[in-house]
Image (spheres, grey):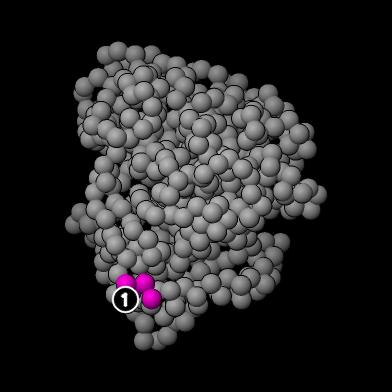
Amino acid sequence: MFCGIDLGTSSVKAAIFLPDGKMVAYARKECDMVSPRVGWSELNPQNYLENVYDVLSAVFNQYKGPVKSIALSSQAQACLPVDKDGKALYNIIVTMDNRTIEQYQYWKANYNEWDVYKKSGVPFSTIYALNKIMWHKQNNPEIYQRAWKFLCVQDYVMFKLTGCDPVIDYSLASRSMMLSIADNKWNQSLLAIAKIDIDKLAKPILSTTVVGKLKRKLSHWLGLSEPCDVIIGGHDQVCGAIGSGVIIPGMMMDACGTVDAMVTVLNDSKPRKAMMKKGLPIYGLVNLKNYITLAINTNGGLFLKWYKNTFYGAEMKDFMLRGKDIYSEIINCSADNPSDMYVLPHLEGAGSPYNDPTSMGAIIGLKSRYNRRDLSKAVLDSLAYEMKLNLLAIEKSTNCIINEIRIIGGGAKTPKWLQIKADVFNKEIVSLENNEAAVLGAAILGAIGIGYFSDIKQAIAQMVKPKRRYIPIEKNVAKYEEHFEEYQEIYKILKPLNKKIFNRINK
């Protein structure tokens, strides 16, 4: 029996799985985002840690049998300075925070992106931990000096669970802009440019490494009768790919969470300029024998949450009392035909393939005859179009044709939404018995780490189970393709205006 913890941005989850993949315990707690200034996004580290303890307590209360391992699936790009006692010196700055535009512009103005990409495997962006540490050094020099380590969420939680020296797995370290893809070591030249001391970083290790035992006091509090191994795990998108069985070229994972993310396995590890220009990274899967790329819409689930809170706020309590999932209700009650209205979902800038932190959201084609059902459909269609941009970018820049897409996360719960995506993408969509693939992927890494399974393929064969296939409906595909052509024009037309407005409100 194996426990996985998913350290997300909007929530923390934990689950316990049997060796056949059956989930026997599950818990989730939402995280409250802190926004001290426009464009800033933070998490309180103490509250976050309490959420981790709460979900662990909940699943161990649900399942009283022996648990052999605990492994982590973690959000990336977040950054937290801590002192030698592990005390947080600042809030966790998360992915969608855009305070690091100045650092991003510094890299763009002074360094060749292709040279940096060949070293780090990532294109320039505001999101990386490297930029966040640089921001601290420039704006909070006393915090930089006091900091023992600058940790991502994975290494912070691991340190708190085990008390062992901070470590970070290769997949998460690859999302920092500080790790060399050639040898999986911290890149000395990039750190020298940023003037970051390597001793302030956790040690990179393999995803299946047993870091240590759960702290005795914590183990006793959880009611465990025997010591439990804690495995480092991996980046949540990598864990999601493993938990959905996407480990060979031609398959893709589409994760619908706080961010929408697409992950696919590459044919080789060769950096390509075409990938860099579309904002697509390259880094190792957990076994370091295969390489993946990742496309991100940083506003996917975040936009849907904003839409829910803004337009369905009055009904949320009623939905909860009736035990209804409000997102499923929004989707199922949306209009049926492709919408003639569009939504540019760039609440916090644009991720790949644009990589534009100055882009902002918009509603296009609004008419007095439209109602909330119509607006809901426009939101769903547009979110699908945004990810189709990434799907096409991946196929064109990697020469890897996608044949099957496995959808995970909250967005995989509603058949209507999955059929919309199948029609928009014109690809076969597969849902899974377990939508919580990131938690399952972490549990799989834990099982491999303690030697229960010999490798990922064996574990996936036992624990990952497809549920239903959604085939594109031909008459819908043609309609959506026509609308997609129009959608692609919106960002281009609004880009200069959005940039002008962005610069004014962020002075």
Tag 1's secondary structure?
helix
Residue 289 horizontal side relative to residue 31, left or right = right
Image quadrant containing the C terminus: bottom right
Residue 140 horizontal side relative to residue 153, left or right = right
Q: Where residue 220 sits in the image (x, y, percent)?
A: 32, 16
Q: Identity of the amino acid at label 1? A: Lys
Q: Is residue 356 visible?
A: yes
Image quadrant containing the N terminus: top left
The residue furthest left is 322
Residue for badge 1 = 475
Tell me the chief SS of the magenta region.
helix
Q: Where residue 387 sits in the image (x, y, percent)?
A: 47, 60
Residue 262 horizontal side relative to residue 193, left or right = left
Query: 71 or 315, which lies in front?
Result: 71
Q: Residue at x 26, y 42 (%)?
A: 465
Magenta stretch bounds? 474-478
